[in-house]
Image: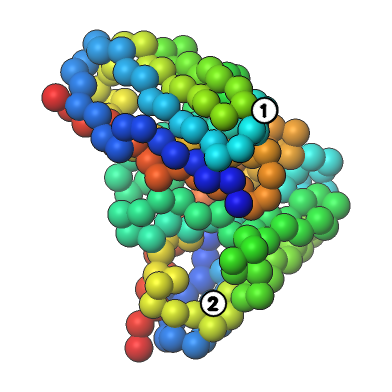
Amino acid sequence: DIQMTQSPFSVSASVGDRVTITCRASQGISSWLAWYQQKPGKAPKLLIYAASSLQSGVPSRFSGSGSGTEFTLTISSLQPEDFATYFCQQAHTFPRTFGQGTKLEIK
Amino acid sequence: QITLKESGPTLVKPTQTLTLTCTFSGFSLSTSDVGVGWLRQPPGKALEWLALIYWDDDKRYSPSLKSRLTITKDTSKNQVVLTMTNMDPVDTATYYCTREIYSRSSFDYWGQGTLVTVSS
């Protein structure tokens, strides 16, 4: 299985801040990476697919980059509704695997 | 409008078989490139992918759970069913049904999830 490792585990930030979350794959996955946002008690929501493609309806302050084994999710200017947990997921091979999550908290 | 909804028992006993049904609308599982899958999330933990079935009846399973899982589809009813045998308390989790577009290989629509507790 491909292992996905996110960093940091958690991050505290303020409204208006720029935040970057990193995801590393244990082997190359080309651009087969997705990012999700999950709020407490809710299902995850797809933000980014194919490493950098913005899912329809997702605000443009979210962006993704990377290829191979290292990827980033950037939120350019945090909004109050962005405080949540973020997961990466590799889509290169089966089984699909997820990172452990990064909790974004209000400072 | 695309929706998915999970249904099934909220409580099962150890060693029993869990059967979950995903009923979806707004798309067809006979359309090329479409798949429906199951994932789960134990309380406070990360997401775990379980199984996927595609429009062409190709089925994929988590290797660690493959011996316990069966996924089937009923295209006429817009339903996908997951069975998991020999349930254990460690299988307590919220189970999600999702749609995957194969060419994008990401889960673009999710059900609300259903919490399944395994306890005697």
Residue, x 21% and y 31% (percent of image)?
A105
Q: Residue at label 1?
A: A30
Q: Secondary structure under badge 2?
A: strand
Residue B82 in the image: state x and y as whole percent.
63, 68
- Could you tell me which quadrant the C terminus of chain B lies in? bottom left
Specify the subunit that label 2 lies on.
Answer: B
- The residue carrying pointer 2 sits among few (fewer than 14), some (14 to 19) or many (20 or more) residues within 10 Å by Cα, namely many
Q: Is residue B120 above or below residue A51?
A: below
Q: Secondary structure under badge 1?
A: loop
Residue, x 38% and y 25% (percent of image)?
A21
- Could you tell me which quadrant the N terminus of chain B lies in? top right
Taking depth in this image into account, of A30 and A47 the one nearest to the observer is A30
Q: Image quarter for residue B97? A: bottom right
Residue A29 in the image: state x and y as whole percent.
65, 33
Q: Are marks 1 and 2 in contact (CB under 8 Å)?
A: no
Taking depth in this image into account, of B38 and B29 the one nearest to the observer is B38
How far is disc 1 from disc 2 in space, using C-alphas?
36 Å
